[in-house]
Amino acid sequence: MNTQDAVSILSCLAQEARLEIFRLLVQNSPAGLAAGEIAKRLNIPASTLSFHLKELSHAGLIKSEQSSRFIYYSTDFQAINALVGYLMENCCGTDKNCCDPLI
Protein backbone atom coordinates (compact mmCIF):
# COMPACT_ATOMS: atom_id res chain seq x y z
CA MET A 1 0.00 0.00 0.00
CA ASN A 2 1.23 3.49 -0.74
CA THR A 3 0.57 6.74 1.09
CA GLN A 4 -2.09 7.94 -1.38
CA ASP A 5 -4.09 4.72 -0.99
CA ALA A 6 -3.89 4.99 2.81
CA VAL A 7 -5.06 8.61 2.70
CA SER A 8 -7.95 7.65 0.43
CA ILE A 9 -9.11 4.90 2.78
CA LEU A 10 -8.73 6.98 5.92
CA SER A 11 -10.52 9.93 4.28
CA CYS A 12 -13.39 7.67 3.34
CA LEU A 13 -13.76 6.37 6.89
CA ALA A 14 -13.53 9.87 8.37
CA GLN A 15 -17.28 10.32 7.86
CA GLU A 16 -19.77 9.11 10.44
CA ALA A 17 -22.25 7.29 8.18
CA ARG A 18 -19.53 5.53 6.17
CA LEU A 19 -17.78 4.42 9.35
CA GLU A 20 -21.07 3.03 10.70
CA ILE A 21 -21.73 1.20 7.42
CA PHE A 22 -18.22 -0.24 7.38
CA ARG A 23 -18.46 -1.42 11.00
CA LEU A 24 -21.86 -3.01 10.34
CA LEU A 25 -20.42 -4.87 7.35
CA VAL A 26 -17.44 -6.04 9.42
CA GLN A 27 -19.91 -7.48 11.95
CA ASN A 28 -21.80 -9.29 9.19
CA SER A 29 -18.90 -10.62 7.16
CA PRO A 30 -18.18 -12.68 5.25
CA ALA A 31 -21.80 -13.07 4.14
CA GLY A 32 -22.47 -9.34 4.00
CA LEU A 33 -25.80 -7.56 3.87
CA ALA A 34 -28.20 -6.43 1.18
CA ALA A 35 -28.37 -2.68 0.65
CA GLY A 36 -31.95 -2.57 1.92
CA GLU A 37 -30.96 -4.29 5.16
CA ILE A 38 -28.10 -1.85 5.69
CA ALA A 39 -30.48 1.07 5.16
CA LYS A 40 -33.00 -0.43 7.58
CA ARG A 41 -30.51 -1.19 10.36
CA LEU A 42 -28.81 2.21 10.18
CA ASN A 43 -31.92 4.23 9.29
CA ILE A 44 -30.26 5.74 6.21
CA PRO A 45 -32.33 6.75 3.15
CA ALA A 46 -31.62 4.60 0.08
CA SER A 47 -30.22 7.46 -2.01
CA THR A 48 -27.85 8.53 0.77
CA LEU A 49 -26.80 4.93 1.38
CA SER A 50 -26.06 4.46 -2.31
CA PHE A 51 -23.69 7.44 -2.24
CA HIS A 52 -21.85 6.12 0.82
CA LEU A 53 -21.60 2.58 -0.57
CA LYS A 54 -20.11 4.00 -3.77
CA GLU A 55 -17.50 5.91 -1.76
CA LEU A 56 -16.59 2.85 0.32
CA SER A 57 -16.34 0.79 -2.84
CA HIS A 58 -14.11 3.35 -4.60
CA ALA A 59 -11.81 3.37 -1.56
CA GLY A 60 -11.56 -0.42 -1.87
CA LEU A 61 -13.06 -1.11 1.55
CA ILE A 62 -16.11 -3.08 0.45
CA LYS A 63 -17.09 -5.38 -2.36
CA SER A 64 -20.48 -6.16 -3.82
CA GLU A 65 -22.10 -9.24 -5.27
CA GLN A 66 -25.41 -9.41 -7.05
CA SER A 67 -27.72 -12.26 -6.13
CA SER A 68 -31.03 -12.27 -7.94
CA ARG A 69 -32.33 -8.72 -7.66
CA PHE A 70 -30.37 -7.86 -4.52
CA ILE A 71 -26.85 -6.52 -4.16
CA TYR A 72 -24.97 -7.80 -1.13
CA TYR A 73 -22.11 -5.75 0.31
CA SER A 74 -19.28 -7.15 2.41
CA THR A 75 -15.98 -6.00 3.82
CA ASP A 76 -12.80 -6.37 1.77
CA PHE A 77 -10.57 -7.57 4.60
CA GLN A 78 -7.53 -7.65 2.32
CA ALA A 79 -7.76 -3.87 1.92
CA ILE A 80 -8.17 -3.13 5.63
CA ASN A 81 -5.37 -5.55 6.54
CA ALA A 82 -3.12 -3.79 4.01
CA LEU A 83 -3.96 -0.45 5.66
CA VAL A 84 -3.17 -1.77 9.14
CA GLY A 85 0.07 -3.22 7.81
CA TYR A 86 0.97 0.11 6.24
CA LEU A 87 0.22 1.99 9.46
CA MET A 88 2.25 -0.45 11.55
CA GLU A 89 5.17 -1.24 9.22
CA ASN A 90 7.64 1.00 11.04
CA CYS A 91 6.25 0.35 14.50
CA CYS A 92 8.75 0.71 17.35
CA GLY A 93 11.77 0.99 15.08
CA THR A 94 13.73 -2.20 15.53
CA ASP A 95 11.84 -3.53 18.56
CA LYS A 96 9.16 -5.52 16.71
CA ASN A 97 7.89 -7.16 19.92
CA CYS A 98 6.11 -3.98 21.01
CA CYS A 99 3.81 -4.25 17.99
CA ASP A 100 2.42 -7.70 18.73
CA PRO A 101 -1.39 -7.76 18.51
CA LEU A 102 -3.25 -7.40 21.78
CA ILE A 103 -5.91 -9.91 20.71
Image: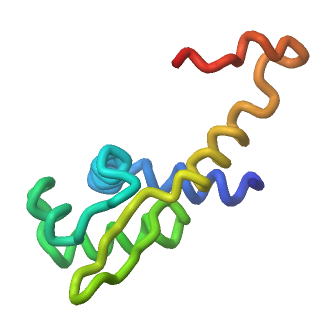
Residue 61 vs 47, above or below: the answer is above
Horizontal and vertical percent position of residue 75:
44, 57
Q: Residue at x 37, y 52 (%)?
A: 29
In the depicted view, which residue is nearer to us: 25 or 18? 25
Number of residue marks: 0
Horizontal and vertical percent position of residue 30:
40, 55
In this image, 45 relative to 29: left or right? left
In this image, 56 relative to 102: left or right? left
In the depicted view, which residue is nearer to us: 93 or 97? 97
Q: Residue at x 61, y 20 (%)?
A: 101
Q: Residue at x 15, y 64 (%)?
A: 37
The quadrant the N terminus occupies is bottom right
Horizontal and vertical percent position of residue 25:
33, 53
Residue sitting at the far right: 94
Say how the picture is coloured: rainbow
Q: Residue at x 14, y 54 (%)?
A: 42
Residue sitting at the far bottom: 69
Residue 58 vs 77, above or below: the answer is below
Horizontal and vertical percent position of residue 91:
77, 23
- Examine the image and state in which quarter residue 79 appears: bottom right
